[in-house]
C-alpha cells in the first residue's frame, strides 16, 4: 500500500491542479483539526486552502455525505476510500449527483483507525474493502493480496439469536440512544429534507430519548436504508453511546443481497433494489 | 475540617449517602463514564477522566414529565409529576463542571422566570467536587484554563475531594458541606499532612495546563458581532459540521428545551425535552418559515450565543472549557479553534 504521507501529497497535487485548471470549484477531502489525531472533513475552495489538506489513518470520514450540500451542477472533486466510493455510486444511482459533475479521487487504503478506540477499522464495522470501486484518479497503488473477512461474518452471533432475543437486544441498545441524530447526519444516504422524524404533521414519534420514539426512529431509519446502505460504518462511529448500528444495516444488506443478488453502490448502471423490479426477483419477502 | 477514606472503600461511603438520599455518581458504561443514580454502592467508579454527558442532567434531566392527562378531562383531573423530595448528592463533579451550575442558575433561577424544578433540585443537592488527577495527562480537547478555571478549584463545590495516592481527601467548602461532612461517620479524620497535601494540590492545579488563549469578554463579544455577516468565515468554519446534536447535549451550559405533548389513544403527557440549536427544526416557525436553514447559520448561533450574546445579556461567557463538544464531535469541530479564528478574522 502507498503510505499515508504519499497519498496526502498526491491528494494535494491533484487538488491544486483541479482548482487551478478550474475543473472543479471545491475539493472535498480531509483537513487539519485541532491536533494530528483529529483531522476533519474539509472543503478546499482555493489553491491556498489546499495547504491544509491532510491524510492519515484517522481520516475515516465519508465525504460523500457532503455532496448533497452543494447545488446540483457544482463541479466537485471528492476524495473517496473504498466504501465512500460506493456511497458516491449510490448517490449517482439515486440521481442526487451527476457523474459528469464529479472528479473522483480514489484512495486505496487499509489500516484506517477509529480515533475513539484506536482500533483498526475492518470488515467488522464496515464493508472491509480496500480499493475504491469507482474513481477518475487513483492516489496510490491498489491494495492486493490482503485478505479481508466477509462483512457478514460479524453477524454470526446475532443470527444465532431468535426473534425474541433480537428484540430484547435492540430494545436494550436503542434505549441508550440520546436522539442526537449524529447517525443520520453522518450517513451519506440520509439526505431527506425533512427527515420523517423531524416532521410535526404528522408527528411520527415523540422527541424524548426513550422508547417507543427511539424504536420508531431507528427501525424506520434502518429500513429506509435497506438496499442503500454501503456499509461505511460512519453511523456507528458517530454514535456517542456506541450503539452497534452496523449490525442491523449489515443484516438488511445481507438479506437484500440474498434476495436480489446485488450489493448497494457497486455500479452506476444498477438501480437501487427497492425501486427496481425484475421478473426474476425473489418472492421471499412475501412468504 | 478534613476527612478521608481509602478509595477502595468508596462503596461504604456510597452506601451511607444512599441511606441519606439519592446518590448520583459516575458509573462505567460501555462507551465511558456517566453520572447515574446509584442503585448498588459498588457501581460508583472514580476511575474516570470526565463523564461523557455533563452533570447538568442532575438538575435539568434530558426528559422531564410535567403532567399526565386524559383528553376531554377537566383541568382538575390532571396529574402533575411528583418531584423526588429526598436530599441528593452529586458525587465526583470536575471543577469546570461545578462552574457550569453557576452559569445555568442565571437561566433557571435568576433571569426573571424561576424554574421550580431546577431550583428545588439545586437546593436539595450537595455537590462533591473532585479535582482532576494531576498525575494524568490533560485531554487535548480541554481548555477550561481559558475560562479562568483550574483543575483543582474547590469553588462552587459544597465538599471538595482530592485524590492522595490510594486515599480520597474531603474538605467542606460551604455551610452545606460543613453540616454534612461530620455526619459521614464512615470517613476518618485527616491529619496535618493531609491538610498540607490538600492545600498544595489546589495550588498545583493552577499549573496543570489546558489549552489557553487570552480572552477579553468585551473583545470577543464585539468581534463576533462584527463578523456576524461574514458568511465566508462561517461557511468555512461549518464546512465539516454535520448539524447533529451531540455538542449541545453533552454541553454543561446548553439549556435549550422543547415542551412536547405526547398523546396516544386520548392519554397524554406534557414534558420538557432537551432541544438543540443545531437541529433544522429548532427554529422552524408555525408559518413554515425557518430563519436558520443553513448549517453555517446554526453553528454561528451556537458560537455567538455562548461567546457574544451571553456576555452582552448576562456578563459571562456561557462555556466552561470542559472540552466535551470537541471530544465527542464526530467530525472534530473544535469550539476553541473557532473562537480563536474568529478573533483573527
Image: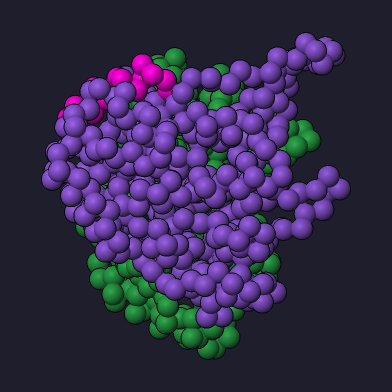
Do we see residue A174 in this rendering? no
How many dots with numbers?
A: 0
Residue A135, horizontal then vertical, whole percent: 45, 68
Q: Is residue B149 left or right of residue B243?
A: left
Magenta stretch: give its range. B8-22
- Looking at the image, residue A63 lies above or below residue B343: above
| Residue A235 painted magenta | no
- Looking at the image, residue A95 lies above or below residue A155: below
Residue B19, horizontal then vertical, whole percent: 36, 16
Please identify the quadrant where the C terminus of chain A is shown.
Answer: top right
Q: Where on the picture, by quarter, is residue A202?
A: top right
Question: The chain coloured purple carries which letter?
Answer: B
Q: Where on the picture, by quarter, is residue A280?
A: top right
| Residue B20 painted magenta | yes
Residue A1, horizontal then vertical, whole percent: 24, 67
Q: Quick one: A19 or B263, which is closer to the camera? A: B263
- Looking at the image, residue B215 lies above or below residue B253: below
Q: Where on the picture, by quarter, is residue B217?
A: bottom right
Q: Which secondary structure is most common in the magenta stretch? A: helix
Q: Which residue is depicted at the point 42% across and 33% down?
A: B176
Q: Which residue is depicted at the point 38% across and 29% down?
A: B179
- Looking at the image, residue B129 lies above or below residue B222: above
Q: Is residue A42 left or right of residue B291?
A: left
Question: The chain coloured green carries which letter?
Answer: A
Residue B229, horizontal then vertical, whole percent: 70, 74
* Residue at the extreme bottom: A20
Q: Is residue A213 left or right of residue A35?
A: right
Amino acid at each position: 500500500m502507498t503510505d499515508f504521507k504519499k497519498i496526502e501529497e498526491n491528494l494535494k497535487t491533484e487538488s491544486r491542479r483541479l482548482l487551478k485548471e478550474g475543473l472543479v470549484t471545491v475539493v472535498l477531502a480531509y483537513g487539519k483539526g485541532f491536533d494530528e489525531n483529529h483531522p476533519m472533513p474539509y472543503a478546499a475552495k482555493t489553491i491556498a486552502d489546499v495547504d491544509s489538506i491532510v491524510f492519515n489513518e484517522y481520516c475515516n470520514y465519508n465525504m460523500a455525505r457532503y455532496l448533497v450540500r452543494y447545488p446540483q451542477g457544482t463541479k466537485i472533486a471528492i476524495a473517496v476510500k473504498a466504501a465512500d466510493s460506493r456511497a458516491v455510486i449510490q448517490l449517482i444511482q439515486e440521481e442526487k449527483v451527476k457523474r459528469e459533475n464529479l472528479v473522483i479521487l480514489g484512495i486505496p487504503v487499509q489500516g484506517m483507525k477509529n480515533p475513539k478506540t484506536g482500533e483498526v477499522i475492518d470488515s467488522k464495522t464496515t464493508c472491509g474493502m480496500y480499493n475504491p470501486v469507482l474513481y477518475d484518479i487513483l492516489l496510490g497503488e491498489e491494495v492486493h493480496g490482503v485478505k479481508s473477512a466477509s462483512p457478514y461474518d460479524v453477524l454470526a452471533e446475532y443470527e444465532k439469536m431468535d426473534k425474541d432475543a433480537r428484540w430484547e437486544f435492540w430494545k436494550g441498545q436503542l434505549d441508550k440512544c440520546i436522539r442526537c441524530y449524529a447517525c443520520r447526519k453522518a450517513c451519506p444516504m440520509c439526505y431527506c429534507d425533512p427527515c420523517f422524524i423531524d416532521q410535526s404533521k404528522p408527528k411520527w414519534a415523540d422527541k424524548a430519548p426513550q422508547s417507543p420514539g427511539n424504536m420508531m426512529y431507528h427501525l424506520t431509519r434502518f429500513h429506509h436504508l435497506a438496499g442503500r446502505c454501503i456499509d461505511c460504518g460512519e453511523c456507528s462511529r458517530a454514535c456517542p453511546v456506541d450503539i452497534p448500528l452496523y449490525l442491523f444495516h449489515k443484516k438488511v444488506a445481507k438479506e437484500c443481497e440474498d434476495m436480489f443478488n446485488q450489493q448497494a453502490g457497486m455500479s452506476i448502471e444498477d438501480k437501487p433494489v427497492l425501486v427496481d423490479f425484475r421478473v426474476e426477483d425473489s418472492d421471499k419477502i412475501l412468504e | 475540617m478534613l476527612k478521608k477514606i481509602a478509595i477502595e472503600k468508596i462503596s461504604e461511603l456510597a452506601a451511607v449517602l444512599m441511606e441519606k438520599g439519592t446518590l448520583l455518581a459516575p458509573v462505567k458504561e460501555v462507551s465511558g463514564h456517566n453520572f447515574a443514580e446509584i442503585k448498588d454502592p459498588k457501581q460508583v467508579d472514580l476511575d474516570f477522566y470526565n463523564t461523557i454527558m455533563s452533570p447538568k442532567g442532575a438538575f435539568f434531566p434530558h426528559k422531564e414529565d410535567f403532567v399526565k392527562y386524559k383528553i376531554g378531562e377537566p383541568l382538575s383531573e390532571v396529574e402533575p409529576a411528583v418531584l423526588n423530595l429526598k436530599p441528593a448528592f452529586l458525587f465526583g463533579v470536575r471543577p469546570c463542571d461545578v462552574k457550569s451550575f453557576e452559569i445555568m442558575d442565571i437561566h433557571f433561577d435568576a433571569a426573571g422566570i424561576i424554574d421550580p424544578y431546577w431550583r428545588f433540585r439545586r437546593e436539595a443537592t450537595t455537590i462533591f467536587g473532585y479535582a482532576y488527577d494531576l498525575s494524568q495527562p490533560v485531554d487535548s480537547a480541554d481548555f477550561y484554563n481559558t475560562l479562568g478555571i483550574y483543575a483543582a478549584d474547590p469553588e462552587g463545590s459544597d465538599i471538595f475531594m482530592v485524590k492522595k495516592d490510594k486515599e480520597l481527601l474531603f474538605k467542606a467548602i460551604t455551610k452545606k458541606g460543613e453540616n454534612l461532612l461530620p455526619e459521614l461517620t464512615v470517613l476518618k479524620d485527616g491529619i496535618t499532612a493531609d491538610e498540607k497535601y490538600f492545600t498544595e494540590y489546589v495550588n498545583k492545579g493552577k499549573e496543570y495546563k489546558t489549552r489557553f488563549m487570552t480572552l477579553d469578554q468585551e473583545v470577543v463579544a464585539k468581534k463576533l458581532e462584527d463578523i456576524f455577516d461574514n458568511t465566508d468565515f462561517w461557511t468555512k468554519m461549518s464546512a465539516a459540521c454535520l448539524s447533529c446534536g451531540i455538542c449541545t447535549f453533552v454541553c454543561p451550559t446548553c439549556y435549550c428545551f422543547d415542551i412536547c405533548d405526547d398523546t396516544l389513544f386520548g392519554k397524554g403527557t406534557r414534558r420538557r425535552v432537551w432541544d438543540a440549536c443545531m437541529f433544522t427544526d429548532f427554529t422552524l416557525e408555525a408559518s413554515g418559515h425557518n430563519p436558520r436553514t443553513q448549517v453555517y447559520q446554526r453553528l454561528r448561533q451556537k458560537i455567538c450565543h455562548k461567546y457574544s450574546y451571553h456576555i452582552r445579556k448576562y456578563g459571562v461567557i456561557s462555556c466552561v472549557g470542559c472540552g466535551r463538544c470537541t471530544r465527542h464531535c464526530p467530525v472534530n469541530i473544535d469550539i476553541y479553534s473557532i473562537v480563536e479564528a474568529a478573533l483573527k478574522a
